[in-house]
Amino acid sequence: MAQERPELPDGYLGEQPKFSDLQLECISHKNPEFELSQDNEVEIKFRAPKSIKTTSNLIQIKPRRRLSIRFGPVSTIDEVIQVRTEKEFPEYVFTQTQGDVVSFVISFPEHGWYKFQIFALGVDDESKSLPNVFNYLIDVKRALKAVYPFPKQYAPWRNGCYLYSPLILNSSSRLHTVNFKTLIPNAKAVAVVAAGEWSQLKKTTGDIWEGTASLDQHRNKNVKVTLNASFGDDDTKFATLLEYIV
């Protein structure tokens, strides 16, 4: 059964006050309310001429129902919708940057209504909280494609990094030889680490790093596989950018 459109506060959808301050521009989805009729994945893109730090929140909106049974000459069952519940799915959003384009790759685990909130702040702004800059309401009609969590993103990843592959990596993936390709500005060295085993990536073109890692021995062992980069003169100090679980 199709769910009714959830009610939202006036002014909730679309641009928020800080959006214009940061000179942000919608590239892919200018309408803040849209429908996905055939797919349960989408990529939302913004142009950010100023360097920004950003985060987001994906929230599923579901009605919570209560069944009350009345006993009498004829038993009846009444369905009462009490309130809508909201559940967050941060693991199904992957944020990356290529030049001045910030993209949010989103997978939706079920059909229904979702709120997608974007928060941003200038990279040099030392404020601890990021203000809300744009809100979407998305109606996912079907969720036929299986979805998997994206890698966990650490703070250094949000400094202009972009992942070509692998976007998804888990115990169901092909692990014998995994090809890694990523753009990491200003990195001095990049490596994939799993259970203490290091696989160094090589710099190819510009800030792009590529290489392979053999991870089949870690399958189904709940091992953390991390993408790490060194940015300073000390190439023994690496910051964690992404974290997968196999």
Image (spheres, rainbow, N blue to C red):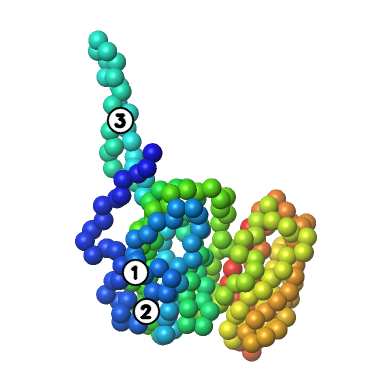
Left or right, 71 with reference to 52: left
Vertical comparison of 228 with 178: above or below: below
Mark toward the start of the polypeptide (3 vs 1): 3
Image quarter of the C terminus: bottom right
Residue under label 1: 134
Q: Tags 2 and 3 in contact by the CB under 8 Å rule? A: no
Q: Tags 2 and 1 in contact by the CB under 8 Å rule? A: yes
Q: Secondary structure at mark 3?
A: strand
| x 44%, y 56%: residue | 36
The x and y percentages for residue 99 are 51, 83
Q: Quadrant of residue 81?
A: top left
The residues bearing labels 2 and 1 have C-alpha atoms spaced at a distance of 10 Å
The disc labelled 3 sits on which kind of residue?
Answer: Glu
Q: Secondary structure at mark 1?
A: strand
The disc labelled 2 sits on which kind of residue?
Answer: Leu
| x 72%, y 53%: residue | 219
| x 35%, y 44%: residue | 3
The x and y percentages for residue 8 are 26, 56
Q: Quadrant of residue 62?
A: top left
The x and y percentages for residue 170 are 65, 56
Tally the numbered discs.
Answer: 3
